[in-house]
Image: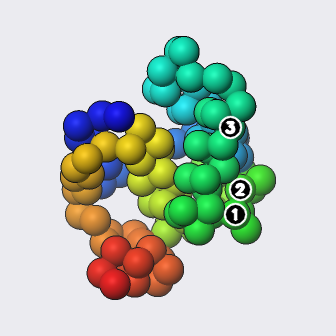
Amino acid sequence: MDLQAYVTQEDTLLGTLTVRETIHYSAHLRLPDNMPKKEKETVVEGTILEMGLQDCADTPVGNWHVRGLSGGEKRRVSIALEILTRPRILFLDEPTSGLDRYINNTLQG
């Protein structure tokens, strides 16, 4: 577990990967090497559910060339990447900027 994590205002995601692939890739890079693969997969799927991304989990993130997620969904993916390590403190730069109603209500609720 990390002490802190930071989510930047700009979402820097690979547009050709799906949501699940993006989170999976990050989990395998950031979670401990000694964590079993099955446990990492459980963390990935749990994070997808926790961030309400299950309906778009197999959708490409998207970019200027590939149609993909909405701005709010991209923001949720960026947050998901940082909560994978379960930080005690999560800093968000402009936390409600670009968020959709789902996550905005969740953060403020």
Mark 1 element type: helix
Local packing at callout 2 (Cα closer than 10 Å; few below 14, some 14-19, many 20+) is many
- On the image, which quarter does residue 87 sit in? top left
Q: Is residue 64 visible?
A: no
Q: Is residue 101 above or below residue 49?
A: below
In the rendered image, residue 16, in percent from the top left (x then y), is placed at 69, 41
Mark 2 element type: loop
Label of residue 57 in the image = 2
Q: How far separated are the C-alphas under marks 2 and 3?
A: 14 Å
In the rendered image, residue 95, in percent from the top left (x then y), is placed at 28, 65
Report the residue at 50% width, 80% height from top. 102
Q: How far separated are the C-alphas under marks 1 and 2?
A: 5 Å
Report the residue at 54% width, 32% height from top. 26
Do the residues under discs 1 and 2 have CB atoms within 8 angstroms? yes
In the rendered image, residue 62, in percent from the top left (x then y), is placed at 64, 52
Tell me which amino acid carries mark 1.
Answer: Gln
Counting residues from the start of the chain, the first of labels 2 and 3 encountered is: 3
Residue under numbered circle 1: 54
Local packing at callout 3 (Cα closer than 10 Å; few below 14, some 14-19, many 20+) is some
Residue under numbered circle 3: 41
Tag in front: 3 or 1: 3
Count of numbered circles in the view: 3
Of residues 109 and 18, which is closer to you in this image?
Answer: 109
- On the image, which quarter does residue 54 sit in? bottom right
In the rendered image, residue 27, in percent from the top left (x then y), is placed at 55, 32
Tell me which amino acid carries mark 3.
Answer: Glu
Side of 46 relative to 56 (left or right): left
